[in-house]
Amino acid sequence: MIGPSQAFALVDVASGLAGTVGQPVDQPKLLGARQMQAMSLAWHIILVCFGVTFPGIVLFTEALWLRTGDLVYRDLARRWSKVMLVLFAVGAVSGTVLSFELGILWPEFMARFGDVFGVAFALEGFAFFIEAIFIAIYVYGWNRIPDRLHLLTGLPMVVAGVAGAYFVIAVNAWMNNPTGFDVVNGQVTNIDPWTTLTNTATWPELIHMLMAAYMVAGFLMGGVYAWAWLRGDRSRRVRVAFAVPFTLAALAAPAQLVVGDWIARYVAVDQPIKLAAQEGLAETTEGAPFTIGGWYEDGEVQGGIEIPYMLSILAFHDPDATVEGLNAVPPEDQPPVNTVRLAFQFMVAVGTGLALLAAWYLLAWWRKRRLPQSKWFYRAAILAGPAAAGALIAGWIVTEVGRQPWIVYDVMRTESAVTQADGVNVGFAVLAFVYAALTVGIIYVLRRFAKRDREADALTTGPEAP
Amino acid sequence: MLAEFAVALLVVGLAAYAVLGGADFGAGFWDLTAGSAERGARVRGLIERSMGPVWESNHVWLIFVLVVCWTTFPTAFGSIMSTLWVALFIALMGIVLRGSAFAFRGESATVSQQRFFGVIFAASSLIVPFFLAAAIGGIASGRVPAGNAAGDLLTSWANPTSVLVGVLAIVTGAYLAAVYMAGDARRGGHDDLVERMRLRALGAGAAAGVVALGGFGVLREDARPLYDGLTEGAGLVAVIISIVAGIAGLWLIWTRRFALARVVAAAAVAAVACGWALAQQPEFLPGALTVEEAAAADATLAAVLIAFVVGVLVLAPSLVLLWRLVLRGRLDRDFRPLGPDRRR
């Protein structure tokens, strides 16, 4: 294990890892590769939320049907499972993009460390396999496999979805907190290939991501039916379809605040410079304050609201604790503070807002046993999904940009990992175009689903009385 | 020894992807050539129904190959992906468009929308196998040196061997797809489609044989070490198995025994993947890295093998379940032609 104290010595080693060609770093190429990777991750991560949580939501709804015999649940589960299949298909291909990009954009990273973290990805491959197999059996098996058995065929996809998230997060946690190898004379040796699976830093990151996935998927799905509610459709179908995903998201939202606190303490110990960037803390400080808002310039946050001792309390649960500042490392080893800090503040602000919205919902349920009646609640519920998605992406900006300039924290610099090939920016432009087209395609297909469902409802039940 | 096992895993993954994923691309080829919306409606409906439940798990074999490669042969992986990035990126865009277009087409409302998504699906079904196979041709003909983008970004995949392997991939995919779909059509009781797919299978099978055998001439000029490897020793054995299975497959199709033809045709294609690996032993990147040089540390190789065994214990029964359900028609949707007569 390479500790932060060895960071300075390792800067030299890391330049030793600069690759077989060893040309000077081409900054536009590095920037293009990073932006292409960022766009691909941001696009994919939204679909991941559905890939991980949708099976659980659909299965839960189907189980409600089998328990109550209420056909509203069955119809919802069936319709959602078709949406799930389409989103899974698109998520599978955008996940493939990431697999390719690891090699296309970061060949030195893969060449040096592929054998250190690869086993987690191998297991993820199997999880993905299982999910793909059972999602097909489940969705194509409606009405063809006996009801209870059909419910059972859905279970592997739920387990595989979560397991897959665990394995991928394990690799990311390893990049943040690399273990399981030594660097001797610029060579990676003494590899422990199971290291990614035993890394304790994985757990807070995984739970944080799973909660976020339930929030993004649940609030986005709920928002669709909040829209229908606002347009006057208060049918039982709409109310149930709103309540199931929204309740799951509303339960995750307050819990996420607690998980966020947990992860912050890990970051404080494992990646103090990332925390310093999140907070705009220039100098190592005893009893450090937390600053809300403002802009980091000339070594301090200007124009923010300062809460004394709060950062020390949040990071170490001790008002007098010492929090490491950016000055602990030379400027070339510091991440871009404002990007990380604004992303962090945005995530926290949105997370707090969503927890308040969730509290409104849960209180109404607890006290009156019904959905809130205020139009303002449903207007907020429509916004909750996109806001949660934005917060999710902001959170990944914090963890990824906050780790810069390192691709493997304190071991390998991102600029040493990037490809020497030409034309990366052309690939970036093409991919951006393809993703734009795909986004349009997804929206089109989802709208078709909605339209068809409305037509089917009108046929079977007739227009409901207001 | 461990390194050879890792190579074997890669070959298994590649062969599975060629046999399963390749057939899905081949289905796209028949979709493209099925004719106008009216004439092709029944063939397209069959494709939709045959591919629907299986194409995603078939696609995972590609991910499997990538993951095993970067874990067990990391240096070679970095070299391959950086030098061949243009071909691989084109294939990748094809994968993205094809998967999405297939998923979207099943849900589209009008014939013109179906046609739009259908053309994207079908065209990318040609692009993906060609460029993935062209990349393999670059590796096999020794055009990928070790190092970060150390090879030529264009000629590494735009060369005679790459073109040959690319065309072969398209033709064998079309052959496999026609064989599988003939069987699926019989199961569904669509006799007209059985005959249409049977003729296509015979044609594509013959074409694949011609390209494969004619290809030896190209390899002799362009990739002599590979040619030598395929014409002697273990490589030659694989080639002979492929030829025998190829002829047997055609005969089985001629006599309408599609269930057996499905297996034999797949074996013929899988033998080609094995033949390639055997022919270039002991090299991983011919002329640049041997298998031993490219292999990761033993601890990692052993871990991958353990992960593979554990994974297969879960995966194998799952795949068997899926294929049994599919081959017995339990997951078949009601057949509906994909075209103008489909009212929505």
Image (spheres, coloured by chain):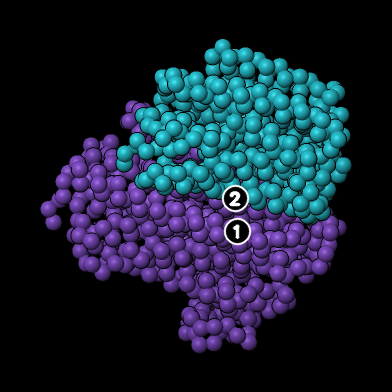
Q: Is residue B218 above or below residue A227?
A: above
Q: What residue appears at the point 57 percent right and 53 percent down from the top-left corner?
A: A169
Q: Is residue A51 visible?
A: yes
Dot 1 lies on which element?
helix
- Considering depth in this image, is B176 or B341 the residue closer to the camera? B341
Dividing the picture into quadrants, the one containing residue A315 is: bottom right
* Residue B66 in the image, given as x and y percentages of width and height: 67, 43
Q: Colour of chain A?
A: purple
Dividing the picture into quadrants, the one containing residue B7 is: top right
Q: Which residue is mark 2?
A: B93
In the displayed structure, does residue B36 sit left or right of residue A278?
left
The answer to whether the residues at label 2 and label 1 have Cβ atoms under 8 Å apart is: yes
Q: Amino acid at mark 1?
A: Val
Q: What residue appears at the point 22 percent right and 67 percent down from the top-left corner?
A: A374
Q: Amino acid at mark 2?
A: Met
- In the rendered image, the quadrant that contains the N terminus of chain A is bottom right
Mark 2 residue crowding within 10 angstroms, few (<14) / some (14–19) / many (20+):
many
Mark identifier at residue A430? 1
Q: What residue appears at the point 74 percent right and 49 percent down from the top-left corner?
A: B84
